[in-house]
Amino acid sequence: MHVLVVHDYGPLGRVLLDRLRNSHLRVSPLLISDPARVDLHALASWIPNDTDLIVNALWLGDPEQAEAGREATHEAAFSLPLALAGHALERGMAMLQLSSCYVFDGRKQDAYIASNPGQPINELGRWQWECEQALRSQLPRHIILRTGWSLARIAKKVYENSANTEALPLPGRCYGQPVAVKDLARVMAAIIMQLDCGAEAWGTYQYAGAEEISLYELGLSIADMPGIPEGIRVVDENPDWGHLEPVNTTMVCTKIRNTFGIKQLPWRRWLEEEFLMATAAEKSENEPAQ
């Protein structure tokens, strides 16, 4: 199977490509340096004709960034995936698309299942939900994978606050499940390998790290890590961006286990590594942009 991995300069694409290149699969990368400015009409010339599966590894998990750049979010979360899906439909290709827990409004009392409809409360979730619905109606051979919180996003917040004398406010009322980059790459690679074996399990799946936690408690866990400056204070308060966070984004991840045999692993396993990855100053900018 020929797999095309669409990625940006973020770590997920790099980690996923490393995993897939160690398999028997034929893997091609497609670097999109700026998803908001990509020439959608040129996609056809960038995608190899013999591609079997398009994997969109552009992971959008920051609702603050999405609100700050609404047009860019629309392009990256909706326009680009739909252009990829349109090409896939014309050429008989399948597609794996990432979404997130932000498609939900958080009002449900218990964890969300994959069949629950989205009712987003922020810009990121809004376009991810629109993308999900469009893929379901336009491309039968698709996998939509909803993810939990980006563990790296919260780790970076704690790190950036280390030079600040003020406490870092994180809302204790918001519960969810973080997911690390390497864990997400593991899950995506496992799905891809089973599609290569002939699995026809198209549809919507959910994955996040095991253990529900509040954003406040997550901040405390990161602040207690070895190597973190001792002066960091995390307080249970609603930050300026708190209105973008649903109160409940916990997800049931049994469907992906029952279908693909993929088990939830504890996000704490990757906590230290994720922190180092999120705070590293080095960037992969030596690849040519498309």
Image (cartoon, rainbow, N blue to C red):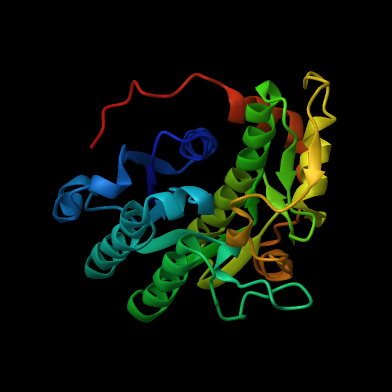
The answer to whether residue 268 shows anywhere in this view is no
Residue at 21% over, 45% down: 46
| Front in this rendered view, residue 90 or 290 | 290
Tell me the quarter of the image containing the C terminus. top left
Does residue 108 lie above or below 205 as drawn? below
Does residue 227 lie above or below 213 as drawn? above
Residue at 54% over, 52% down: 193
Name the outermost residue toward the front. Answer: 166
Q: Position of residue 186 (x, y in %)?
A: 62, 45
| Front in this rendered view, residue 126 or 178 | 126
Does residue 220 lie above or below 258 as drawn? above
Q: Quadrant of residue 208?
A: bottom right
Residue at 15% over, 50% down: 42
Total marks drawn? 0
Does residue 58 lie above or below 33 as drawn? below
Left or right: where does residue 250 sit relative to residue 104?
Answer: right
Residue at 80% over, 55% down: 172
Q: Quadrant of residue 44?
A: bottom left
Q: Position of residue 236 (x, y in %)?
A: 80, 49
Left or right: where does residue 101 sit relative to residue 268?
Answer: left
Left or right: where does residue 269 sit relative to residue 129?
Answer: right
Q: Position of residue 218 (x, y in %)?
A: 78, 45
Q: Position of residue 72 (x, y in %)?
A: 33, 52
Left or right: where does residue 114 sit relative to residue 50?
Answer: right
